[in-house]
Amino acid sequence: MYRRAASGERVCSTCLFNAVVDQVKKALNYFAMVRKGSRVLFVVRPDKPLESLIALRVFIKAAKDFDLEIHALCIDGIAPCNEIGSQLQELVKEVHRYRFVGDLPSYMHMVKAVSSICAKVAREIDAETCVEPYTRDELTLFALLGILRVEKEVFSEGLPVKKIDRLKIARPFYYAISHDIAALTYLRRELRDLYADTIPFISFSKSELVVLQGFAKILAGSTELAYSSHKTVELLQSYLIGDSPRCRFCGAFADSDTCRYCRDLIPVLSA
């Protein structure tokens, strides 16, 4: 049994799984994230590869009525593709691997690299949507960090959908909380016993990290607070974003067609 931090209810793994499925269904429908019968590309998060496997299982069930052709992307060099490859192959039509060679100076650079690589591979396989399994509390932290830095390219990472021309980068776990995904991962023995390396959490400046760690503890304990906090920062969206163009690599709003993070990654992304 697992006690949900947000509601306090005690649930079994099956009930928890189904509850998260319902949250993903809500986001898929409310934000029109996918088109029925289309091809989508689900990306494995380098920082949370095992949680990504659970998230993929949730997504597959939640999107059942959309009759999607689901592919998966694993980024060699920053994700443990060899360790989780067989699990991915059991779940999707095809697994794509992209070799990343380069440095990631910060956590936000990793977020940008994942979006940019997913968009690049999606175009190659003619997928309409990239699926990134970030949860509501994580997206809220991105938005809060964007406000702290007054950076629209960071703030817009908190949005449920980014766009690059007609390609969507969707976050269907917009109504889910990271603690629930972590619990589902731990409750599956085959994942709990699976070895997987993750990149270090090298994130932000010391002062910002202190603030965000405090926010993370508070938001993870209350779904309602995560929702209301995100709504509050959305009020500043027009101030931060306005009529800004989107980055051609990651889809975030920026001051030009290439955000400063993707500008650092151009040698890698253009390879």
Image: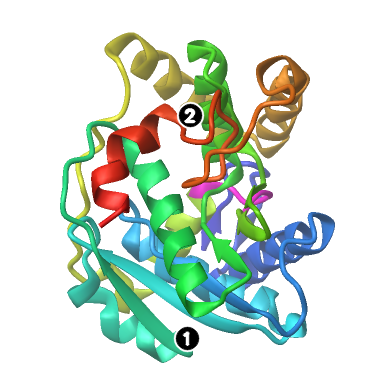
**Which residue is located at x 68 percent, y 62 percent?**
24
Q: Is residue 3 left or right of residue 23?
A: left
Amino acid type assigned to the residue bearing label 2 in the image: Ala
> Quarter of the image containing the C terminus?
bottom left
Residue extending farthest to the top is 207
SS type, badge 1: loop
Residue 103 appears in the picture as rendered = yes
Q: Position of residue 4 (x, y in %)?
A: 58, 49
Write down the residue under mark 2.
Answer: 216
**Viewer-closest of 157 and 49:** 157
**Viewer-closest of 109 and 89:** 109
**Viewer-closest of 98 and 197:** 98
**Which residue is located at x 75 percent, y 28 percent?**
228
**Which residue is located at x 51 percent, y 57 percent?**
133
Report crowding for label 1: few under 14, some 14 to 19, many 20 or more residues within 10 A (C-alpha): some
Write down the residue under mark 1.
Answer: 92
* Region of the chain picked out in magenta, as a range: 173-178
Q: Are marks 1 and 2 in contact (CB under 8 Å)?
A: no
